[in-house]
Image (cartoon, helix red, strand yellow):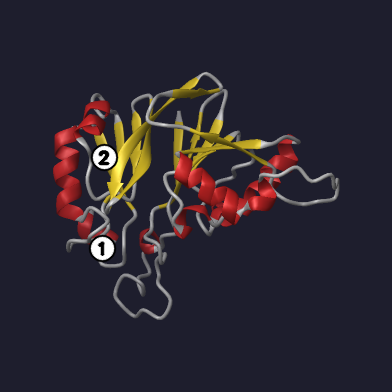
Amino acid sequence: MKISFLGTGTSHGIPMIGCNCKVCQSDDPKDKRTRCSVHMETDSVSIVIDTAPEFRLQCLANNITNIDAVLFTHTHADHIVGLDDIRRFCAIKKSKITCYSYAKAIQSLQKMFSYAFIDINQSYSERPKLNARIIDDKPFEIEGLEIIPLELYHGQEIIFGYRIGTFAYCTDCSAIPQKTFDKLKGLDVLVLDALRYTPHPTHFNLEQALEAAERINAKTTYLTHIAHEIKHSELTP
């Protein structure tokens, strides 16, 4: 499986509009962070997790030309508003693409992007053509690839992370339930939310992320959803 980080920034993106801090003004390309999204590819399937506002640019930068399915963690704007750009992949495939998430998230997507989930008999209509599949916390398959949804707390809200093989993606979390810790054993790669140094009500700060990472004990852990309080070179020598 090939994993590509399309974006690792917080909801504002880095640099933030009108900010003169050392991170937003940094010349280090690793301090330029678009909003969070991940692409996963095997020999048989191509999947993205979330469609960030910069989704089109992320796909161009990473030479992504095929997507078979989209997994959504939740429906905050920084994770979904690039969904319209899926229309190009529908045109390439000449078929609908299925979006997967929990019931509340799917309902939100169908409300915000209603035109993408209905059949319109207009051959010239340039729009995403999407199927919706509601999932719970039970494993399911996409083209033979097992996907394990992971319940996470994002403040008071329960959202989803995902485990695929020995890879797990857990963004936008402030707490991990015990039953989810049980599903995170034996990982090769963990991607974990780490917003900033100071506490936040709906995200792990760096200390909390490192504590969770130590408990999960993946072979390698990467941090994501990083705000402008953290300069890459100061955290990673």
Q: Which residue is mark 1?
A: 230
Query: In this view of the protein, which residue sits in the foreground, 58 or 176?
Result: 176
Query: In this view of the protein, which residue sits in the foreground, 145 or 158?
Result: 158
Q: Can residue 162 be seen in the rendering of this structure?
A: yes
Residue 236 % position (x, y) = 23, 53
- The residue that appears at 27% across and 56% down in the rendered structure is 202
- The amino acid on which the numbered mark 2 sits, given as a three-letter code, is Thr
Q: Which mark is residue 26?
A: none
- The amino acid on which the numbered mark 1 sits, given as a three-letter code, is Ile
Numbered label tally: 2
Q: Which mark is residue 221?
A: 2
Residue 85 % position (x, y) = 63, 52
Residue 196 % position (x, y) = 23, 61
Side of 71 where 178 appears, left or right: left
* Circle 1 SS class: loop
* Residue 191 lies in quadrant: top left
- The residue that appears at 50% across and 54% down in the rendered structure is 52
- The residue that appears at 55% across and 53% down in the rendered structure is 55
- The residue that appears at 39% across and 66% down in the rendered structure is 14
Asked whether the residues under the numbered discs 1 and 2 touch, taking CB atoms below 8 Å apart as contact, a structural biologist would say: no
The quarter of the image holding the N terminus is: top left
Q: Residues within 10 Å of mark 2 (few under 14, many from 20)?
A: many
Q: Residues within 10 Å of mark 1 (few under 14, many from 20)?
A: some
Which sits earlier in the primary sequence, circle 1 or circle 2?
A: 2
The quarter of the image holding the C terminus is: bottom left
Side of 232 where 15 appears, left or right: right
Q: Can residue 60 be seen in the rendering of this structure?
A: no
* Circle 2 SS class: strand
